[in-house]
Image (cartoon, grey):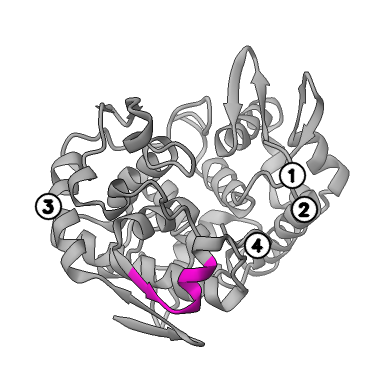
């Protein structure tokens, strides 16, 4: 696949996808597949299905970059959390204290101050609040009002209306229907597929058109693809990445779409659902192939999903491991897509 963006070309590196798939296939066999039942972050296993569905759809709606000017991190009940981990820890804590908080009726009336109070944490340097509370409040209210209008305020009605499909030109699958909500309007469908991943693992939704499954592409997955050269970029966009110049909306969409296509090819070669592949990619991007001091530089083991990687398993085929000046990731900050 080849995409043209202004004076740049982005294409999937099929040969490198094959090389990567051979290695990743063996790693995936060792992983513990997350069922998202840990009450530290998610609704308990025995929770009411509608409550589970509400929690995930509202939490995923605001699951994008948590910090911009200062880290979103701190201690909750004696344990340190950072970024998305803190977001879901505060979500689970709120669910336990006030389950009705996640009802569409309450969310439709949510104020910016209420959201800011919920997603803030006291630290030695003062109160730290999640980035862009105004945007997140708007996303939650839009989602709640449309759930009430179109689905009687029931997320399970939304799932039922999708008829076990992700995408369908006739009946509209779940991915199609989610596009009506502003929070899920990303053309590359990051949040939509993340929501699918959560609710399918919790047994609330199964999809028969498995060929339509995709990875939820965020900056972590894009960074891995760039460093491994699963996609190749020629022209001004490569210079933008190297110099840390911010992408515009269309450039970001095209790059992440190419990344998604590369991982789709990877999943086909391995023979797994892209959402299973995403378990490895999410862990690997956050814990191993990090933006700063990745495992190939740090010589420090990374742990997650039941495995311990003492060195990068992809180091022998990764072009970035052979240079001191590694591509980091493309810069695109002002977005609620991911």
Question: In this rendering, is residue 144 above or below 248?
Answer: above
Q: Nearer the viewer, mark 2 or mark 4?
A: 4
Q: Nearer the viewer, mark 2 or mark 1?
A: 1
Give yes or no for contact between labels 1 and 4 (Cβ–Cβ under 8 Å).
Answer: no
- Picture disc at residue 56: none
Residue with the mark numbered 2:
137
- Picture quadrant where residue 18 is located: bottom left
Give yes or no for contact between labels 1 and 3 (Cβ–Cβ under 8 Å).
Answer: no
Residue at 38% x, 39% y: name it.
283
Residue at 43% x, 47% y: name it.
198
Q: Residues within 10 Å of mark 1 (few under 14, many from 20)?
A: few
Q: Residues within 10 Å of mark 3 (few under 14, many from 20)?
A: few
| SS at badge 4 | loop
Q: Where does the magenta region start and end?
A: 232-240
Residue at 56% x, 57% y: name it.
338
The location of residue 289, given as percent across then percent down, is 38, 42
Please give left or right for residue 36 compared with residue 84 in the image. left
In-front residue for pair 85/222: 222
The location of residue 242, given as percent across then percent down, is 49, 62
- Picture disc at residue 22: 3
Residue with the mark numbered 4:
335
Residue 239 belongs to the span the image colors magenta: yes
Instruction: First in sequence, mark 2 or 3: give its number.
Output: 3
Residue 24 belongs to the span the image colors magenta: no
- Picture disc at residue 69: 1
């Amino acid at each position: 696949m080849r995409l043209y963006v202004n004076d740049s070309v982005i294409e999937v590196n099929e040969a490198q996808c094959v090389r990567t798939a051979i290695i990743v296939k063996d790693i995936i066999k060792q992983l513990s597949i997350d069922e998202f039942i840990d009450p530290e972050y998610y609704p308990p296993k025995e929770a009411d299905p509608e409550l589970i569905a509400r929690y995930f759809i509202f939490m995923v709606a605001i699951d994008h970059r948590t910090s911009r000017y200062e880290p979103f991190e701190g201690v909750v009940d004696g344990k340190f959390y950072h970024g998305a981990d803190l977001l879901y820890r505060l979500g689970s804590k709120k669910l336990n204290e006030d389950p009705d908080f996640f009802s569409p009726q309450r969310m439709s009336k949510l104020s910016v101050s209420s959201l800011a109070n919920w997603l803030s944490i006291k630290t030695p340097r003062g109160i730290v609040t999640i980035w862009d509370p105004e945007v997140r409040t708007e996303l939650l209210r839009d989602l709640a009002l449309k759930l009430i209008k179109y689905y009687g305020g029931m997320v399970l009605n939304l799932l039922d209306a999708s008829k076990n499909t992700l995408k369908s030109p006739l009946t509209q699958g779940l991915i199609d229907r989610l596009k009506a909500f502003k929070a899920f309007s990303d053309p590359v469908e990051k949040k939509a597929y993340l929501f699918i991943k959560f609710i399918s693992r919790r047994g609330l939704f199964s999809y028969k058109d498995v060929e339509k499954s995709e990875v939820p592409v965020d900056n972590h997955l894009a960074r891995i693809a760039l460093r491994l050269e699963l996609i190749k970029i020629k022209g001004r966009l490569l210079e933008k990445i190297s110099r840390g110049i911010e992408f515009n909306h269309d450039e970001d969409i095209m790059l992440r779409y190419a990344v998604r296509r590369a991982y789709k090819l990877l999943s086909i070669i391995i023979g797994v659902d892209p959402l299973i592949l995403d378990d490895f990619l999410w862990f690997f991007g956050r814990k191993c192939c990090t933006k700063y001091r990745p495992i190939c530089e740090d010589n420090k083991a990374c742990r997650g999903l039941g495995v311990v990687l003492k060195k990068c398993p992809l180091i022998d085929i990764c072009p970035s491991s052979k240079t001191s000046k590694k591509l980091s990731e493309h810069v695109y900050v002002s977005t609620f897509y991911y």
